[in-house]
Each structure stands twice: as C-alpha cells, then as structure tokens.
Amino acid sequence: MNFPKELKYTKTHEWAKREGNLITVGITDYAQKEISDVVFVEAPKLNAVVEKGKAMAVVESVKAAFDIYAPVSGKVVKVNTNLEGDPAIVNQDAYGRGFFCQIEMASAADWDALLTSEAYEKAIKEGAH
C-alpha cells in the first residue's frame, strides 16, 4: 500500500497535506480499497467550520456509507467539486485529484497530533480499523 511520507494520517483513514496553514484532506489508499467502488461523495460545505475528529463529509460505495472525519479543526476554504460528477476519482487518485477539501487550520497543535506514515501503517497492521 501507498502511504506518502510527506502526508500525515488519522486512525480513521484520512490523509492531510500541509501547505502553510492550509490542510488538504482526503481518504487514504487503504481506505478507498477497503470501501471499494465510490459512487457518491457528500463533501463538506464551503466556509463550514469543522472540528477535529468530527464527521465532515460522507462517502458512499457499493458496500455502504462512511463518515469522513476532519483531521484538524478550522474552516473549509475549498471543496473538490469534481467529486460531485465523478466520485470514482477517489478510487483512481486518492492522494491527488481525489481530495475532498482544504481546511484553514485553526491550531498547529492539531497537525502535530496527526500520525506519521510509519505510525499509520503500524496502526493498520495492528488492526485499527
């Protein structure tokens, strides 16, 4: 599986990429394989205030619906509207075009609390689903 080292992760299988105070968020390669074919994405609303660890979006696959949790607290400043018309992008490019949103992070402490790629991979191997 692919866990880019420059990203940080949550135990609930979201990834986060930091550029200054902006955090781009998506689900991991592991998660998209587990949920299989994504058929619908309900992304967070633009300008919504999200709270770390709380549901902010929903992904539906042929298997079930899954909540997507905010890896950091802050304000949603960009939403990937491409997912509305083509939710399968999540399966095709989880770490790129399949991102969900960008959050303007409220506290750098949230970033520091996220998992490294090594810690995330270890959590998966230990069965933290």
Image (spheres, rainbow, N blue to C red):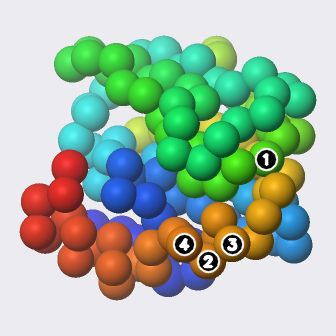
- Marks 3 and 2, how far apart at CA: 5 Å
Residue 7 occupies quadrant? bottom right
- Marks 4 and 1, how far apart at CA: 15 Å
- Marks 4 and 3, how far apart at CA: 6 Å
Circle 3 SS class: helix
Q: Position of residue 46 (x, y in %)?
A: 84, 26
Sequence-wise, which precedes: disc 4 or disc 1? Answer: 1
Residue 99 in view in this figure: no
59 or 68: nearer the viewer: 68
Mark 3–mark 2 contact, CB under 8 Å?
Answer: yes
Q: Which mark is residue 74?
A: 1
Residue 85 in view in this figure: yes
121 or 55: nearer the viewer: 55
Left or right of 90, for residue 13: left
Q: Amino acid at mark 2?
A: Asp
Circle 1 SS class: strand
Q: Which mark is residue 109?
A: 3
Mark 4–mark 3 contact, CB under 8 Å?
Answer: yes
Left or right of 66, for residue 33: left
Residue at 69% of width from left, 26% of height from top?
A: 44
- Marks 1 and 3, how far apart at CA: 12 Å
Mark 2–mark 4 contact, CB under 8 Å?
Answer: yes
* Residue wearing tag 4: 113
User: From what the image shows, is residue 62 above or below residue 117?
Assistant: above
Residue at 11% of width from left, 68% of height from top?
A: 126
Circle 4 SS class: loop
Sequence-wise, which precedes: disc 1 or disc 3? Answer: 1
Mark 1–mark 3 contact, CB under 8 Å?
Answer: no
User: From what the image shows, is residue 72 above or below residue 37?
Assistant: below
Q: Residues within 10 Å of mark 1 (few under 14, many from 20)?
A: many
Q: Which mark is residue 112?
A: 2
